[in-house]
Amino acid sequence: MSAKNGWMRSFRLLGCLMAVALLGSALFASAASAKKTEPTNPTVYINMGDSVSYGYTAEKFDLNLEAGEPPSAFEGGYPNLLNEKLAKKEAKVGNKLELINLACPGESSKGLIGNGPIAAALEAHAAETHFTGGEAPCGWHNSSGLPRHYEFGAVSQLEAAVGILQSGAQVKDITFQIGSNDELHKLGECANEAYLIAHGFSGGFIECVEVEAKNTLFPTIITNLGLIVHVLRTPVLEGGGGYTGPISILAFYNPQTYLVSGSDQLQGDLNSALIETVTGGAFGPGVTVANPFKKTNPQGKKTQSLVERRDLEAAAICHYTEECNPFDRKIEYEKATKTSVTAEEMAAIEASLNSKFLKEEPGGKFLPGDIHPTPAGDELFAKLLKGALKKA
């Protein structure tokens, strides 16, 4: 993604707006506290993203509500696991790697870019950037007041990352995942009858999802992913991060294949388009994609029956995501039916149903689990990203 001179001039205005001194002082104060017996040269791994990157699950959130949702309760996500793997390599050369996890639950690709100076620069050259606008960043913190793993004020994740890079920190690796909330927002729109009528979708929800995904949603996600990379790569003197190291993007998985008909095909198409765009060089050198889809959503072999293929994917979804978590299923059942049940009663209800995922009850259809990854899912993502970073 090459930038024109006008775009670059706009980025030059950003250097003084990144709160470099504040971010830099926080970074090095943390590094200075390292034990003398450990490697002393501070290096950094930056991650950005939404609730998946944050380490969020619905069960963790419910169990930590009274405690104020301390970030320490959400430290089992893939960034922490990947940091452990990367830190071992860094320690061998005397470096102490620090994870700076900027992730914010609920974030969209527009929110990760934000609605600040970076967004303004991109919008000023929309014909070149194809940027369709930013959003207010990190409602988790800025609207709801919930704490983050790494506090960076009211700026966006991308602005915070640029500030860290401009501070002179030795950033060795950057990973991010974003776009799932863009998809969820679109699903919500397509489930709205007024939206369907206003946009002429006589075929209903499925038609809306398929058309909107291919025509607007997927192109927007991929464009924003590319712009995130571009801003990180833009020279510091021009207002960007000036980062030249490896960047890896975690692609998409589909925990809702049994809820949204045809969603496996669409999610696979998005991953393919992203991989093709990156390998084709549109994001520049040193960028790779870690794709979990074959593991989380195996499609089986053509020689297998439909039932066998369904069971194969169902088992993978239960293993890598929280869709089959009994805690979440019980909560979703109670919401749908407006009744309270014991764990034993819920187990009996589960045993009487013939589907693990989409179920018919008096309160209507409900999804019995949580879309977020299990510990096995986080370990899978960390492993894939480590391999992708090696190739970057």
Image (cartoon, rainbow, N blue to C red):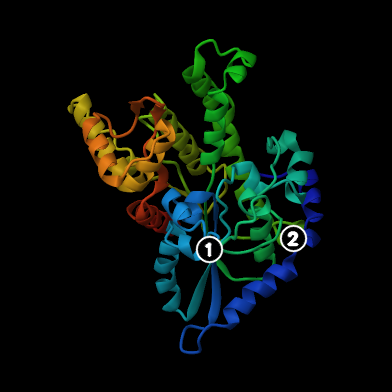
- Give the mark nearer the N terminus: 2 vs 1: 2
User: Where is residue 338 drawn, in percent x and y?
Assistant: 43, 33
Q: Residues within 10 Å of mark 1 (few under 14, many from 20)?
A: some
> In the image, 319: left or right of 155?
left
Q: Which mark is residue 128?
A: none
The residue located at (60%, 34%) in the rendering is 220
The residue located at (53%, 63%) in the rendering is 70
State which quarter of the image contains the N terminus.
top right
Query: Vertical placement of 316 versus 57: above or below?
Result: above
Query: Vertical placement of 102 versus 254: above or below?
Result: below
Query: Vertical placement of 78 versus 322: above or below?
Result: below
Whether residue 182 is visible to the viewer of this picture, yes or no, is yes
* Tag 2: amino acid: Met
What residue is shown with label 1?
Answer: 70
Total numbered circles:
2
Q: Which mark is residue 18?
A: 2
Locate residue 133: give its quadrant.
Answer: top right
User: Where is residue 184 drawn, in percent x and y?
Assistant: 52, 35
The residue located at (29%, 46%) in the rendering is 343
